[in-house]
Image: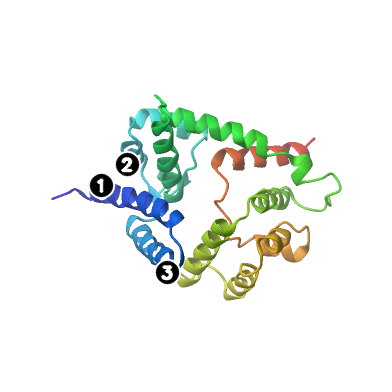
Amino acid sequence: MESPHTTRERLIESLVCLRRARSKAEGELKADLSSIADLLEDLVGPTVRPAEAARLIGMSATALHRWLDSGDIATVLTPQGRRELPLSEVLDLLEDVEQARRGGAGRPLTRVINERRRRAEEAVDLARLLPRQTRRTHRTAELQSLAYHRLVAERLDESTIEEARRRLLRWHEQGRIDPRWFEEWLGVLVKSPAEIARLIGADTRKARELRQTSPFAGMLNEQERRLLVSAVEARAHG
C-alpha cells in the first residue's frame, strides 16, 4: 500500500498532466478537465510541504530550502506555523522544470529561477505601470495592487480570464468571498479582455475596492511580485 505522501505526490503529478491537457482542450472537455482538477486540488490541499516539493522536482530538500530562504519561491505559513509552498506554485514549478529538462538544462530549477528573474526585470517597469501623475493619496499597498493589476492587464487573454472565473466560482462555493463582490467580479469577467484590462487597471475608488477581492491573485510569479513590491516601496520612500 502506498504511503499518504506517495499518494499526494501522485495526485500532484496528475494535476500537472491535467493542466497540460486542459490548455489544449476546448468546450465541454475543457470544463470537465477543470472539474476534475478542482477535485484533485481539494484532495491535495492548498499547500505542499518542502520535502514533498523537493521529491517532486527531483532535488534534495536542502537545495530547495536554499531557494525558499532566498525568497525566489513563494511560501506561506500554515495555521500550524509551518512554512509550506502554495500548491499553485508547486504546479507552476513542476511545469517549468519539466520544460527546462527537455531543453537539456543540467540544473533545471536554477535555469527556471534565473529565467523568471530576467523576465521580471523586463516586465516590472514602474514608469510604464505607474506614471508619476498617479495620485499620491494612495497608500503603498494600494499602489502595489494597482501596478500588479496593470501588469496582469497587459497579459490578459482568454485563458487567464477563464482561470480567474474558475477561481472566483470556487471561492463562492467555499464561502470565501462576499456575495456582493462575487456578483461584481462575475459582471466584470464576462466582458471583453480589453474592457476587463481597463477595469482592473483603473485608478478609481471603485477599482481599488474591487481589487481587494481580486481573482487575478497569483497570476504573477514570485520574482515579478517581489520586484514590483520593492519598486513601489522604493518610489514611496524615494
- State the image quarter where residue 121 is shown: top right
- State the image quarter where residue 179 is shown: bottom right
Q: Where is residue 236 in the image (x, y as percent from the top left)?
A: 77, 41
> Distance of mark 2 from mark 3, alpha carbons?
33 Å
Q: What element carries label 1?
A: helix
Residue hosting label 2: 52
Q: In this view, does 47 lie above or below 118?
A: below
- Decide which of tag 2 and tag 3 comes sooner along the chain: 3
Q: Which of 141 and 130 is in front in this view?
A: 130
| Residue drawn where x is 62% and y is 37% of the image | 120
Q: Do the residues labelled 2 and 1 touch (CB within 8 Å)?
A: yes
Q: What element carries label 3?
A: helix
Residue hosting label 3: 28
Q: Which colour scheme is used?
A: rainbow
> Distance of mark 2 from mark 1, alpha carbons?
7 Å
Label 1 environment density (alpha carbons within 10 Å; few <14, some 14–19, many ≥20): few
Q: Position of residue 145 (x, y in %)?
A: 67, 52
Residue hosting label 1: 5
Q: What residue type is labelled 3?
A: Glu
| Residue drawn where x is 32% and y is 52% of the image | 14
Label 2 environment density (alpha carbons within 10 Å; few <14, some 14–19, many ≥20): some
Q: Nearer the viewer, residue 66 or 149?
A: 149
Q: Where is residue 40 in the image (x, y as percent from the top left)?
A: 34, 59
Q: What residue type is labelled 1?
A: His
- Decide which of tag 1 and tag 3 comes sooner along the chain: 1
| Residue drawn where x is 84% and y is 52% of the image | 135
Residue at far right of view: 133
